[in-house]
Amino acid sequence: MTRTLLLLIPAVLISSCDGEGSGVTLSVDPEQHRVEVRMDGELFTVYRFEPMLDKPVLFPVNAPGGIAVTRGYPLETVKGERADHPHHVGYWLNYGDVNGYDFWNNSRAVAPDRKVHYGRIVHREVLRAAVEKDTGILEVKMDWMAPDTDNPVRLLEEHTTFLFHRTGDVRIIDRITRLTAVTDTVVLGDNKEGLAAIRVARQLEHPEERPVVLTDASGRPSDSAVVDNRGVTGHYYSSRGIEGTEVWGKRAEWVRLTGQKQGGTVSIILFDHPGNPNHPPLWHARGYGLFSVNNLGQKAYRGNLPALSRVMVKGESLTLKHRMAVVRGDPQEEEINQIFSRFSQE
């Protein structure tokens, strides 16, 4: 069945399937600037659009059993996490070069006198919150604004549909994003900082021997850097058979990240849709926990490749489709390729 409730007053809106605590449910709370998504009563993720954020994000993202696969810093107090890149929050989509403005690296850590170089993505409206059969549907509208001053300029209008569903025990988020130029010309330059990305929990990082600054019990950065790989177990594997940190800057249809957390194996798989530009794309997947697929950057990763530059005139649109699967366990290539095959036909 389909059940859609429309927001009539500033209050909590709930869209759910039949059965208390069963299936997928969405709860919209405009006053708290969030939409909660649950599966079988368990929190899966939250679409967050508080004004203090420089872009809307999905945070946290949880595997079955309530296991967070996203890093808590800087939004949550978690001891022992890397205290770096405060712009890496949850699961998001943005880009490092839009008409010369940097949307990727913007955060509260940017000095006020530098904000004129950074763009913000501003949530405008929840267009739809519904459940159809076993799929939660969240449609939102955003504006890509630059520069971040008292008189921002709107460059792009974003219309994104999130689909929350599952295949067996595999939780899935499909993100379908349409970007439309609303100024005369929008240029997306070749840049490594993009595009659909998740910052993962410490346990899913790759071990390394360089000292890093970790958060203390209060969630603040500690005073000194340390080498501490306790519980750090992450490992990348791509559709092209490339492993570990070597996936960075390489092409692949999908990449899986697997590690151990809370006594069990958890995996995140990101998929690129064949209809996206520059498919199969290059991956901005770092051992320190940034896991990203970039359809718009190329030369920024590998200098022997020609630079990409996408020019959009006013009214022109670009549509991008990405899938993220979260699972307890270590799905193998055959299962992952089946998921990719189904996604490719959608």
Image (cartoon, rainbow, N blue to C red):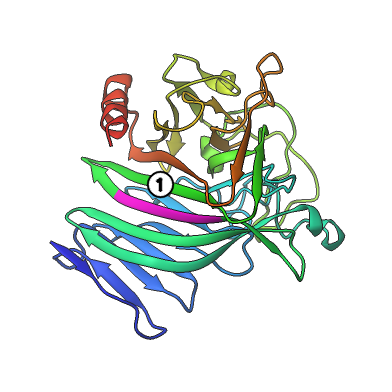
Magenta-drawn stretch contains 336 = no
Main SS of the magenta segment? strand
Magenta-drawn stretch contains 160 = yes
Percent from the top left, x then y, of residue 273? 39, 32
The answer to whether one can see residue 76 in this image is: no
**Element marked by disc 1:** strand
> Viewed as shown, does residue 228 lie left or right of 178?
right
| Disc 1 target residue | 176
Name the amino acid type tagged 1: Ile
Where, by quadrant of the figure, is residue 284 drawn? top right
In depth, the one of 39 and 111 nearer the eye is 111
Q: Residue at x 19, y 60 (%)?
A: 22
The region drawn magenta spans 157-164
Q: Residue at x 19, y 68 (%)?
A: 3
Where, by quadrant of the figure, is residue 155 drawn? bottom right
In depth, the one of 102 and 74 nearer the eye is 102
In depth, the one of 10 and 158 nearer the eye is 158
Mark 1 neighbour density, 10 Å: few (under 14) some (14–19) many (20 or more)? some
Q: Residue at x 52, y 38 (%)?
A: 203
The answer to whether one can see residue 124 in this image is: yes
